[in-house]
Amino acid sequence: MSSPSEPRRLKGHRATATCCIASRDRPGLVATSGEDGCVCWFDMRCKDVQLVMEIGKEASSSLCFKPGNEDIVYVSSGKEVKCFDVRLGTSSTPLECYDYNKEEINQIVCSSKSFLAAADDGGEIKIIDIRQQCLYKTLRNGHSSICSSVQFLPWKPWEVITGGLDSKLVMWDFSKGRPFKVVDLGSSEMTSGNSTGQCFNPAFVHSIAVPDVDMLDKLGKICVVARGDGGADVMNIESELAATRTKSSVKPRKGSHSRSNDAENTDTRGRLHLDYTLGGHTAAISCVAFSMFGQRGEFIISGGNDKSIKLWNLFKYIDTNQSGSQSDLRDLLHLNIDLSRKPK
């Protein structure tokens, strides 16, 4: 395992920083949101914060760039989504404001097709058409608790995947407004597939990451799920859907006892589960992301309530599997960074 350099502290917020995003067009530019209702802009070439935008009195839990135009940023503020032009500096007047969510928003993301998704504490996801500046669809009845994370699937322009504190992972066709696949990470089938686990912590879904389009050739159509029991699941979405189709096609013969074990085992087969037995987190994982440096997508980055950041070498796992050799999963942990506080 590589030895990390000393982490650099970026100071600008007066309260907890809740979200951090890095520019793709301008390397070294980082934007953060916080519970102080501010968005801070940092240039990694400089020591001090470059710009502080006062968004509002409510805590800001999430922010994202507009795809194709990083001068435009969307920020959640309590139950609202606000849009700002960074070129206007500290101006607190939003270009647009969307007040569709009934509960506090946990995450917002934008798609390349000009849609924005906002997941909230009520378990609902609002899909907003940012081109027409109106509500497109409300996704409900998928989560029975807080919806903590949402991501558009870049290879399926009309689909999103969401995770919640009901331990559910839900795939939606948002053009129809309904879910077509639900994975219960807290079910007995899911937990039995993992050799070990922290049985006292539920498998709440705290964060989801999906690869960008230019990563698909190497990584495939996967997602990474940050779990409340300290594990991170790497799941092949197409395999999950294939398993669903297999189950639905298995019909018991008349008068015979149904045996669906093979179909059920397909749900956990092929999943990569990264937990503390491999050097992973010893507490809930709060966030996951794919690396954007070097070979994009080479590493999974996870942050946990054990005050650590871990880098997992996903390319190594893929290469050994493709070569047919048996990989030692303990070699996947590439780097561990200890922090003084929990990452959000």
Image (cartoon, rainbow, N blue to C red):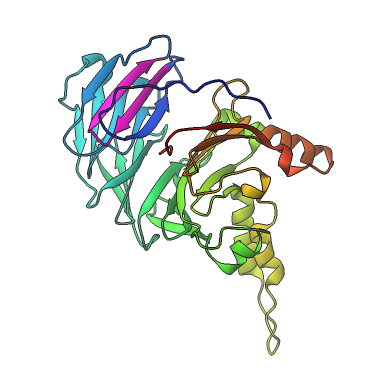
Quick check: 232 above or below 267? above
- Residue positioned 40% across, 58% down in the render: 178
Looking at the image, which residue sits at the far bottom?
Answer: 255
Q: Nearer the viewer, residue 211 or 188?
A: 188
Quick check: 18 above or below 197? above
Q: Nearer the viewer, residue 304 or 163?
A: 304
- Residue positioned 24% across, 52% down in the render: 103
What span is colored magenta in the figure? 29-43
Say which quadrant the N terminus sits in: top right
Asked which quadrant contains residue 129, the reply is top left
Give how far across and how far down residue 273 sits, in percent.
64, 50
Say if the magenta span includes residue 325. Answer: no
Say which quadrant the C terminus sits in: top left
- Residue positioned 76% across, 34% down in the render: 319
Quick check: 172 above or below 210? below
Looking at the image, which residue sits at the far front?
Answer: 340
Give the overall secondary structure of the magenta segment.
strand
Q: Is residue 221 visible?
A: yes
**From the viewer's perspective, is 104 left or right of 65?**
left
Q: Is residue 212 visible?
A: no
Give how far across and how far down residue 73 sits, in percent.
31, 26
**From the viewer's perspective, is 2 left or right of 28?**
right
Give how far across and how far down residue 265 sits, in percent.
68, 64
Count of numbered marks: 0
Give how far across and how far down residue 250 sits, in percent.
67, 71
Q: Nearer the viewer, residue 220 or 27?
A: 27
